[in-house]
Image (cartoon, rainbow, N blue to C red):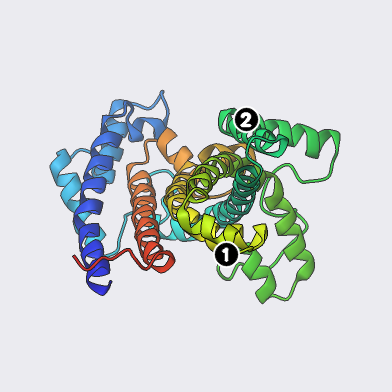
Amino acid sequence: MHSFILRRCAQLVPTLLGISLLTFSMIHLVPGDPAQIMLGERADAASVAALRTEMGLDQPLYVQFYRFFVDLLHGDLGRSFRTHEKVTTAIAQRFPATFELTFFSMVLAILGGSGAGLIAAARRGKSADYASMIAATAGISLPIFWLGLMLILLLAVYLPIFPISGRQSPHIYFPPHTHFYLLDTLLDGNLGAFANVLWHLVLPTLTLATVPMAVIARMTRASLLEVLGEDYIRTAWSKGLGEKTILLRHAFKNAFIPALTVIALQFGYLLGGAIITENIFSWPGLGHWLFLAVQARDFRAVQGGVLLLATLFVLINLLADILYAWLDPRISYHK
């Protein structure tokens, strides 16, 4: 197992190098000049040329990539063209918002999807099965932007239960020690602020969790139906074990292994795909920041953000591989 983890960590280096090169190439292929965008359409050519020189955009692409890669080896992602702040500082301040949103969305998706898939498999061919799968199909089909707007309209406008946007109310203040607001409020001992931050999480979490919840539900149902047809399950039935014991202690653990792959992939997708949800709810996270960076052709910000998300995606899949061996001892990584 240790050798497998070391091999996967070694593979991370060329993977991230390839991702950084691909991201660098693609962002430079996007039409638009960052200097021109920053100065405006009425800026004269001399001012644009001077700003391009100041930002290093007048150098050949291979020189720009070399400088980016050398700075990356020293842990420096450069400064944002748009805000002039260090990219590492900006990411450190905004990533916690994205992680909080993604984490709670994934927890909701796992609990709801696994539960729905378990009920559907246990009641195959009955009304509960049909209802669960219809809901799962609808969850996959509904556009996130439409669902988010409908939730805002229903639960924040017509029924003013939840806040429309942001991570906290304007009158709430607490020291941002870690920028993980739930943790910061607990460290500050401010339970009122904790409840306020948690309340702001509800609508964006529901919106972001819909698609992965539907995918996990369908995968869990399919895996459980396959496992329930195995010989050892029939043996358990013949021994007189109860349905709850058979489903939860014998079938679900083995059926969860294929679903684990989907969960790992969905978690990675949510980290990088929260852009739409963050823009709908004005969530000040990494996705919203990257959206503004792409609009402004902020090369360094985009490269840094994408590189972080790619690293997390690879690490999440590594964790999933390790969990396989924990769930199923028959899986070996010695070869």
Q: Secondary structure at mark 2?
A: helix
Q: Amino acid at mark 2?
A: Ala
Residue 316 location, quadrant: bottom left
Earlier-in-chain disc, 1 versus 2: 2
Q: Residue furthest front?
A: 238
Instruction: Count neighbours of disc 2 (C-alpha within 10 A) and say few if under 14, some if 14 to 19, many if 20 or more.
Output: some
Q: Residue at x 47, y 38 (%)?
A: 291
Drawn side of residue 30 relative to residue 115, left or right: left
Position above or below: 145 against 77: above
Q: Please state the horizontal and vertical placement of residue 6, each as a whole percent of the image.
A: 23, 69
In terms of depth relative to the viewer, which is nearer, 233 or 64? 233
* Residue 207 in sight here: yes
Instruction: Count neighbours of disc 1 (C-alpha within 10 A) and say few if under 14, some if 14 to 19, many if 20 or more.
Output: few
Query: Could you tell me which quadrant the N terminus lies in?
Result: bottom left
Q: Which residue does the numbered mark 1 point to in the structure image?
A: 249
Residue 186 location, quadrant: bottom right
Q: Residue at x 37, y 68 (%)?
A: 329
Residue 54 location, quadrant: top left
* Residue 96 in sight here: no
Whole-number angstrom distance, CA of label 1 to CA of label 2: 30 Å
Position above or below: 104 against 299: below
Q: Which residue does the numbered mark 2 point to in the structure image?
A: 138
Drawn side of residue 295 relative to residue 18, left or right: right
